[in-house]
Image (tube, helix red, strand yellow):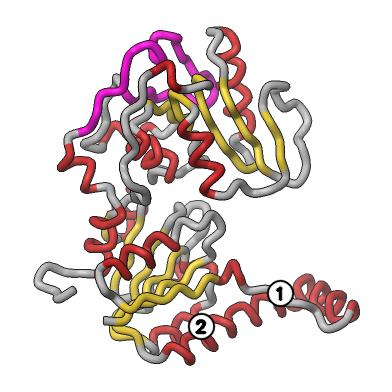
Amino acid sequence: MKICLISFDHWEYDNHIIKTLEDKNIEAHHINTGKFKYKYPTPLHKVTNFLSKVILKRNIKKIKQHQYILNELNKLGTQDKILVINPELIPVAIHKKIKNYTKEYIAYLYDSSKRYPIDHLLDNIFDKILSFDSDDVAQYGFSPISNYIYMDKKPLQQPNEATYGAFMILSIDERLQTLNAIANRLNIININYNFILVGKHKPAGLNININHQRDIIKLDRLDEYMSDAKVFVDIVRVNQTGLSFRVFDALCYQKKLITTNKTIKDYDFYNPNNILIVDADNPIIEASFFETPYEPLDENIYYKYTIDNWVNTVFFEKGDTI
């Protein structure tokens, strides 16, 4: 069986899907549009593209990126299944051409349609659409699926093994106010933390104890940070109901979680001893949450959220030969 994944793999999460497929002896390929680099032939071409984007709404770099997808598919040939993650980033015309290369075209929406509208992709382009957002599942009838645990389970740590009380990494966006509010609350209850804000420019008004850096943190470095904290912090975007990867990192590392995502209480792994739901505008956090130990999950519940089960759910119906 041949399976191809198309995605903009910014944080290198998607590559774990390929590895899991390969472990099942599937011929798997990843067209990572994040690795496509377009170099303007001359400075004039750069100016021309800027004017084209502003006046004609036509972006040469995007056009070249989409052609890159088709070129790579042409090299790979027909696939049994193709999965595209966040398909709203690709025009309908390109989707129709991609579909010619596969027997089954699947989409996974890892963003709310309130943030990235997908109405233009609903006209029989995909054979199956999966979404992590419960509101979109209810509105459009998509197949529900969460994100996944992409690593082997980490051993349960003793509380004194962690340097920091809490860990959080965040890109600069509208969640900054909540990040500051949580940091301020942790200061009050004397819980130390390692909060990292990633972006080009350090925003004004950032809590002095929050670290700012320009470069993206690689997964191996992220592993060190997460291993060195008692509790993970998760701040969801406005109108998002799906669970972020930080939730599944907490399950994997067997760490407690503070989150603003109220829908987490609807999942079978929810345990108020392990997970504290806070209000984004007024996060109430007590030191006692950090003092009680993590309660491990039942193994059957844990497996439901592993990448192995995710891959089986997305690509293989019951009775399929893997």
Q: Is residue 259 above or below residue 315?
A: above
Q: Residue at x 52, y 21 (%)?
A: 163
Whole-percent x, y for residue 173 in the image: 64, 42
Dot 2 alpha-carbon crowd within 10 angstroms: few under 14, some 14 to 19, many 20 or more: some
Residues rendered magenta in the picture: 274-297
Among numbered discs 1 and 2, the one appearing first in the sequence: 1
In the picture as drawn, the residue positioned furthest to the right comes out as: 44
Q: Residue at x 53, y 42 (%)?
A: 222
Amino acid bearing label 2: Ile
Q: Residue at x 48, y 38 (%)?
A: 236
User: Can residue 135 be spotted in the picture?
Assistant: no
Q: Residue at x 44, y 21 (%)?
A: 161
Which of the numbered marks, if any, corresponds to residue 94? 2
Dot 1 alpha-carbon crowd within 10 angstroms: few under 14, some 14 to 19, many 20 or more: few
Count numbered badges in the picture.
2
Name the side, left or right, on which 290 lies relative to 48. Answer: left
Whole-percent x, y for residue 252 in the image: 34, 39
